[in-house]
Image (cartoon, rainbow, N blue to C red):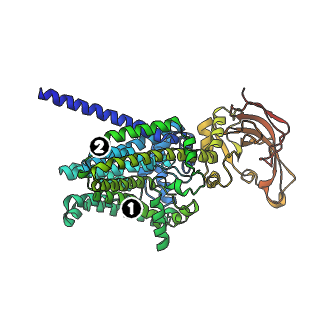
C-alpha cells in the first residue's frame, strides 16, 4: 500500500512538472512573439548571405569556417573560433528567416531552463527557480541598436548556454565531490573563453561559488587554479594574435578616462533593468500614455498575462523563503550585471556609441547576460522583503507584484513590437521585396556574370520625423546587397555595384557626352517603396529592372551622370488594388522612364 502511494505521488509530481514546463514554454513563446516578425539587422544583414557565398564559391562548411577564423584574427586581432563556428552553422543551415528566428526563440527557452536549473541546485528551492524562470521574459527589451536577441545568430544565447552549463557542473562538483563534474565544467568554461571575451571577467562567478562552498580562501584558490590557468592561456593566445597581425578590434581598444568608464558602466548596467529602454525612450519611439498601451493590447498579450498569473499564484505559496540566502543571490546578481559591463565600460568605441544611440536604456550585446543578473537582484530584494514583513501582509505584496509584472508584460510586448516594426521599416521591408523579386525570377534571361547597378530607394516610413532613424545608415555601412545574396535567392551569378564609377572607368580628359553600353551586359535594379499617392501605401514595394543602354556623363562627378535604360520587367508585392502610373521615377534622378504603367495583382 505504501509503495503504491509513493508511485502515485511520483506520478503526480511528473504530471505537475510537465504541466508547469508546458505552460512556461507557451508563456515564453507568447512573450517573445515580436521576435518571429523581425528581419535581418546589424551583422545579420551580411551574415545571412553566408550560405550563398559557400554555395557560389563551392567550398565546404569547415573550409569556410577556418577561413573566417583566420580573417577575424588577421583583420581584427580576435581569436573566437567557437562563436564563428556557431555563426557559420546558423547562417548556413537556418537561412530561412522564420526558421532562424524560431531557432533563437528555442535557444532563449533553453537559456531560461538552464538558468532555472542553476538557481534550483544553488539555492535548493525548485519553486523559487520556477518563479525566476517565469519572470525572465520581462527583462528582454528590444532596441534600435545592436540587439543580442534580434541579431547576431544566437551568439549571446549560445554563450549563455556554455556559461550556465559550466556553472551547473561546477555546483554539482561542489555538492557531490565528483571530479568528473569539475572536468566538464572546466571544458565548458574553456569553450566560453574562445566564444566571447567577456568570459574572462565572468570567471569571478566561478570563484564566488567555490569560496561560498569551502569558506576558505586558500582551499578555494587551489580549486580555482585550473580556471586561472585557462584564463591565462586564453589571454596569451589573444595577445599573441594581436601583436602578430598588428590589428585590434575597435571594440576592445581601451580608454582609461575614469569619468567615461563609470558613466558607461552605469549606462550599460541600467539597460538591463526591466523597461529601462521604454522609460528613457532614447529613440522617441514610445508613447508613455498608459491608455495607448491598453488600446494596443492583442489577444496573445492577454494570454501571456493569464498564464503568468496562473503559474505565479500556483507556485508562489510553495516557496520556503527561509531556505533562500538573499545575500548570495544578490551577490551573484550584482556580479552578473557588473562583470559583463566592465569590458564595455573600458571600450573607447562603446563609451561613444552608447551615447550616440541615446545613452541610458541603450545597452550593447552583453546586456543579454545582464538581464539574468538584474532578475536575480530583484528576486533577492523580494526574498528579503518576504523575510521582513509579517505573514498577513504577504498577500498584499504578492498582489502588488503580480499587478506590476502583468503591466510590465503588456508594456514590454507593445514596445518590442514597435521596435521590430521600426527596424523592419528601416532595414528589412525593402530587402524582403528584393528577395521575393529574386525568388520570382526577376533576373530571367540576364546572362551569367552580368553587372547590376543596385539602387535602394525604399522610402516607406510611417513614423514621425522626430523618431530616431539611425539604423538607415546601416544600409550603406553594411555590404548586404551583395552577389552572394543574389545567388542565394536567384541561383544566378552576377556582379553587384552601387556606383557608376565601379563599372565605368573614364579619365577626366577623356570624358565624352555619352557612353554607349548597348553591347554590355550592365543592368539597373531599383528597389522602391510604393509612391506616397498610392491609396494602399503600406509595407509593400516593387523592384524594377532595366538594361542600361548609355550614360550621359556628368563632368564634375561621374556618379551623378544620367542613366538611360531599356525597361525590362518589374516585380511587385501583390497587395495594392490599383494601378500605379509612373511618368518618371523621381527617386532615381539619373533614370528616365516615360509612361510606364504598373498593374498589381487583383
Residue 339 marker:
1
Image coords of residue 131 (percent x, y): 34, 45
Q: Is residue 569 visible?
A: yes
Image coords of residue 557 (percent x, y): 79, 58
The foreground one among 544 and 566 is: 544
Q: Quadrant of the N terminus?
A: top left
Q: In front: mark 2 or mark 1?
A: 2
**Vertical position of residue 280 compared to residue 176: above or below:** below
The foreground one among 360 and 520 is: 360
Q: Secondary structure at mark 1?
A: helix
The foreground one among 293 and 66 is: 293
Q: Residues within 10 Å of mark 1 (few under 14, many from 20)?
A: many
Image coords of residue 262 (percent x, y): 46, 69
Q: Is residue 29 visible?
A: no
Q: Secondary structure at mark 2?
A: helix
User: Which residue is the site of mark 2?
Assistant: 317
Q: Kindly identify the residue that appears in the image at 22 percent across and 51 percent down.
A: 173
Question: Does residue 334 appear to the left or right of 37 in the view shown?
Answer: left
Q: Kindly identify the residue that appears in the image at 27 percent across and 32 percent down.
A: 14
The foreground one among 402 and 456 is: 402
Q: Quadrant of the C terminus?
A: top right
Q: CA distance from mark 2 to mark 1?
A: 33 Å
Residue 318 marker:
none
Question: Does residue 599 appear to the left or right of 88 in the view shown?
Answer: right
Mark with earlier residue (2, 1): 2
Question: Does residue 485 appear to the left or right of 378 in the view shown?
Answer: right
Count every numbered label the image shows and give the total. 2
**Which residue appears farthest toward the right when viewing the image?**
513
Amino acid at each position: 500500500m505504501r509503495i503504491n502511494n509513493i508511485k502515485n505521488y511520483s506520478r503526480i509530481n511528473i504530471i505537475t512538472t510537465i504541466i508547469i514546463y508546458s505552460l512556461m514554454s507557451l508563456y515564453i513563446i507568447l512573450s517573445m512573439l515580436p521576435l518571429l516578425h523581425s528581419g535581418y539587422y546589424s551583422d545579420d544583414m551580411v551574415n545571412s548571405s553566408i550560405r550563398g557565398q559557400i554555395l557560389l564559391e563551392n567550398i565546404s562548411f569547415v573550409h569556410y569556417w577556418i577561413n573566417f577564423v583566420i580573417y577575424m584574427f588577421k583583420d581584427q586581432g580576435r581569436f573566437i573560433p567557437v562563436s564563428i563556428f556557431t555563426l557559420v552553422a546558423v547562417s548556413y543551415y537556418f537561412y530561412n528567416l522564420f526558421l532562424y528566428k524560431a531557432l533563437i526563440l528555442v535557444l532563449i527557452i533553453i537559456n531560461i531552463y538552464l538558468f532555472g536549473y542553476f538557481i534550483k541546485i544553488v539555492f535548493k528551492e525548485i519553486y523559487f527557480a520556477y518563479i525566476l524562470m517565469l519572470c525572465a521574459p520581462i527583462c528582454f527589451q528590444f532596441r534600435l541598436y545592436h540587439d543580442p536577441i534580434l541579431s547576431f545568430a544566437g551568439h549571446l544565447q549560445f554563450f549563455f548556454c556554455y556559461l550556465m552549463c559550466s556553472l551547473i557542473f561546477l555546483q554539482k562538483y561542489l555538492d557531490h565531490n565528483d571530479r568528473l563534474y569539475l572536468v566538464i565544467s572546466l571544458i565548458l568554461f574553456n569553450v566560453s573563453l574562445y566564444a566571447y571575451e567577456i568570459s574572462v571577467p565572468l570567471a569571478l562567478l566561478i570563484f564566488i561559488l567555490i569560496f561560498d562552498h569551502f569558506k576558505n580562501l586558500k582551499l578555494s584558490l587551489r580549486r580555482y587554479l585550473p580556471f586561472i590557468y585557462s584564463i591565462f592561456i586564453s589571454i596569451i593566445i589573444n595577445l599573441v594574435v594581436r601583436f602578430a597581425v598588428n590589428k585590434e578590434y575597435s571594440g576592445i581598444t581601451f580608454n582609461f578616462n575614469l569619468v567615461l568608464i563609470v558613466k558607461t558602466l552605469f549606462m550599460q548596467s541600467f539597460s538591463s533593468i526591466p523597461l529601462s529602454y521604454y522609460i528613457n525612450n532614447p529613440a522617441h519611439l514610445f508613447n508613455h500614455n498608459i491608455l495607448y498601451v491598453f488600446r494596443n493590447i492583442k489577444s496573445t498579450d492577454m494570454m501571456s498575462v493569464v498564464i503568468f498569473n496562473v503559474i505565479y499564484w500556483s507556485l508562489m505559496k510553495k516557496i520556503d523563503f527561509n531556505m533562500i540566502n538573499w545575500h548570495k543571490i544578490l551577490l551573484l546578481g550584482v556580479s552578473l550585471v557588473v562583470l559583463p559591463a566592465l569590458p564595455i565600460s573600458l571600450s573607447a568605441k562603446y563609451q561613444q556609441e552608447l551615447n550616440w544611440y541615446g545613452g541610458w536604456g541603450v545597452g550593447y550585446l552583453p546586456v543579454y547576460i545582464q538581464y539574468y543578473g538584474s532578475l536575480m537582484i530583484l528576486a533577492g530584494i523580494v526574498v528579503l522583503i518576504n523575510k521582513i514583513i509579517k505573514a498577513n501582509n504577504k498577500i498584499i505584496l504578492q498582489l502588488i507584484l503580480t499587478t506590476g509584472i502583468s503591466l510590465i508584460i503588456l508594456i514590454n510586448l507593445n514596445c518590442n513590437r514597435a521596435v521590430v516594426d521600426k527596424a523592419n521599416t528601416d532595414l528589412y521591408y525593402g530587402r524582403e521585396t528584393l528577395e521575393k523579386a529574386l525568388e520570382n525570377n526577376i533576373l530571367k534571361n540576364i546572362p551569367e556574370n552580368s553587372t547590376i547597378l543596385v539602387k535602394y530607394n525604399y522610402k516607406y516610413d510611417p513614423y514621425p520625423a522626430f523618431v530616431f532613424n539611425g539604423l538607415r545608415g546601416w544600409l550603406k555601412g553594411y555590404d548586404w546587397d551583395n552577389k552572394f545574396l543574389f545567388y542565394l535567392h536567384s541561383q544566378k551569378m552576377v556582379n553587384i555595384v552601387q556606383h557608376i564609377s565601379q563599372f565605368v572607368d573614364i579619365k577626366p580628359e577623356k570624358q565624352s557626352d555619352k557612353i554607349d553600353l548597348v553591347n554590355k551586359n550592365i543592368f539597373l535594379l531599383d528597389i522602391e517603396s510604393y509612391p506616397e499617392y498610392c491609396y494602399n501605401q503600406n509595407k509593400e514595394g516593387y523592384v524594377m529592372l532595366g538594361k542600361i543602354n548609355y550614360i550621359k556623363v556628368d563632368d564634375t562627378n561621374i556618379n551623378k551622370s544620367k542613366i538611360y535604360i531599356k525597361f525590362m520587367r518589374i516585380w511587385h508585392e501583390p497587395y495594392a488594388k490599383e494601378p500605379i502610373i509612373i511618368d518618371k521615377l523621381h527617386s532615381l534622378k539619373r533614370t528616365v522612364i516615360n509612361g510606364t504603367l504598373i498593374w498589381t495583382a487583383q
